[in-house]
Amino acid sequence: MLIDTHCHLDDPTLLASLPEILAAARGAGVVKYIVPGVAPEGWDGIARLAEEWDGVCPAFGLHPMFAGLYDEILLTRLRSFAGRAVAIGEIGLDYLAEVPRERQQAAFRGQLRLAVEAGLPVMIHCRRAFQDLLAILREEHVQRVGGVMHAFSGSPEVARECIGLGLYISVAGTVTYRNAVRPLEVVREIPLEHLLLETDAPDMTPEPHRGRGNEPAFLVEIARKVAETKGVTVEEVTAATTRNAVRLFRLS
Ligand SMILES: [Zn+2]
């Protein structure tokens, strides 16, 4: 049994055919789905999905792309969702986004503090900002709650630094792409006990499904590629990554 540790089931393209998508996922052995929030207008919908659908586990957060919305009122609202969350996320830094870096950093810090206060792990999005991100994670004591580097795009060295802070490294569909180099290096060098799997659906569709929307059922392609790269069986990859996800998000 696999766990998709990052999929946006509340995205309109997935929501429209959710019964079929979840049936296909279950058929493929993908039985739990962590659904992260990216902006406050989506939080209620994610909470509702988790109540309605078996295996859907909610997380709430403000994505760095929307950090312009960050203020004390938003933080208070986010705190009110913490009681039903398996994590705070997705949060982080994205220096390819147009939001000023200072605003992103303030939103990231505030949400990290909330997570530590609530005792919840964090789901982290990071693009082109690893040095600043690592410094903030250290200063805000992320190791007290742990978390995951979602769709990790850094080097094996950065991955090891993240692991030192109590974070898991999450592998997404990029490992299946023909031009993949760095993602495969990370998979090769980082032991299974530190890895999680995710689709990031509806984005990042893995091979051989590229060209259409991504969905949790396709997680098996990522598990297969990780197994092939590490020279182990798919069953070993499944067992280890599911164990890691259950531990991090305290799933039953
Ligand atoms: Zn995402």
Image (cartoon, rainbow, N blue to C red):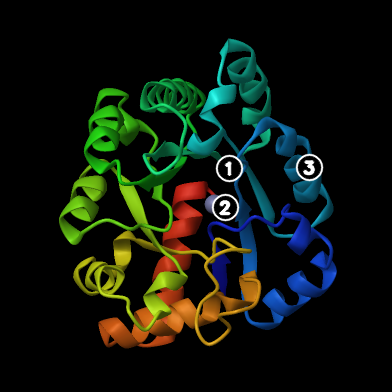
Residue 15 found in image quarter: bottom right
Task: Return the x and y of residue 121 as percentages of the image width and height.
Answer: 46, 39
Q: Are marks 2 and 1 in contact (CB under 8 Å)?
A: yes
Task: Say whether residue 60 is left or right of residue 98.
Answer: right
Q: Are marks 3 and 2 in contact (CB under 8 Å)?
A: no
Crowding at label 3, few (<14), some or many (≥20) Cα neighbours within 10 Å? some
- Classify 182 as above or below 38: below
**Viewer-side residue, 149 vs 94:** 94
Q: CA distance from mark 3 to mark 2?
A: 21 Å
Residue 60 found in image quarter: top right
- Classify 240 as above or below 97: below
In this rendering, the count of numbered labels is: 3
Q: CA distance from mark 3 to mark 1?
A: 16 Å
Disc 2 target residue: 251
Give the mark nearest the N terminus, 2 or 1. Answer: 1
In the displayed orientation, state which residue is furthest to the top. Answer: 72
- Classify 59 as above or below 71: below
Amino acid type, mark 3: Gly
Q: Residue at x 70, y 55 (%)?
A: 56
In the displayed orientation, state which residue is furthest to the left. Answer: 157
Q: CA distance from mark 2 to mark 1?
A: 8 Å
- Classify 100 as above or below 38: above
Amino acid type, mark 2: Leu
Task: Return the x and y of residue 219 as percentages of the image width and height.
Answer: 54, 74
Task: Return the x and y of residue 108 as percentages of the image width and height.
Answer: 43, 28
Residue 86 numbered mark, or none: 1
Task: Say whether residue 151 is left or right of residue 76.
Answer: left
Figure quadrant of the N terminus? bottom right
Q: Residue at x 40, y 49 (%)?
A: 148
